[in-house]
Amino acid sequence: MTTRDSHVCAVGIGMPIQNKQNGYITSWDAGELAADCINAAAERAIQPASADNPSALVCLNFKNTLSQILREKVEGSRVNQGCRPGIPPTPVGF
């Protein structure tokens, strides 16, 4: 998707170490679960968005969709506005 505007969509994901639903969650499993949820949210929120949509609104829709999908998969997970200080961001282009 190419838009004429510019917006950095900063997203941080918090994952519990353990919960009743999933048991102990290793960092590898947390990463895999997060990646699956990110891909699903992108398919629902980003891919159908037209280039006329402001990227900030597409980002907000993506975060809301990601939060919903992630909470369904892992109880206690959360989507934050960005990464913790000191954690380098991972740029993703689309």
Image: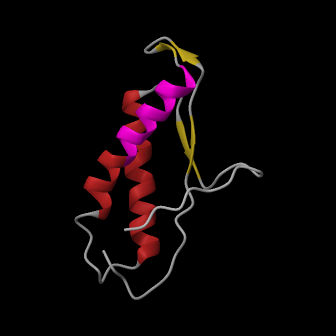
**Magenta segment includes 30:** yes
Point 42% across, 52% down: residue: 64
Q: Residue furthest right?
A: 86
Q: Residue furthest bottom?
A: 4
Q: Left or right: 35 with respect to 84?
A: left
Place residue 49 in its image quadrant.
bottom left
Location of the C terminus by quadrant is bottom left
Above or below, comparing residue 17 to residue 92 in the picture: above
Point 54% across, 39% down: residue: 78
Point 39% across, 60% down: residue: 61
Residue 12 in the image: x percent, y percent? 58, 48
Above or below, comparing residue 38 to residue 71 in the picture: below
Q: Residue furthest left?
A: 48
**Magenta segment includes 16:** no
Q: Read off the magenta span.
A: 26-38
Residue 24 in the image: x percent, y percent? 53, 12
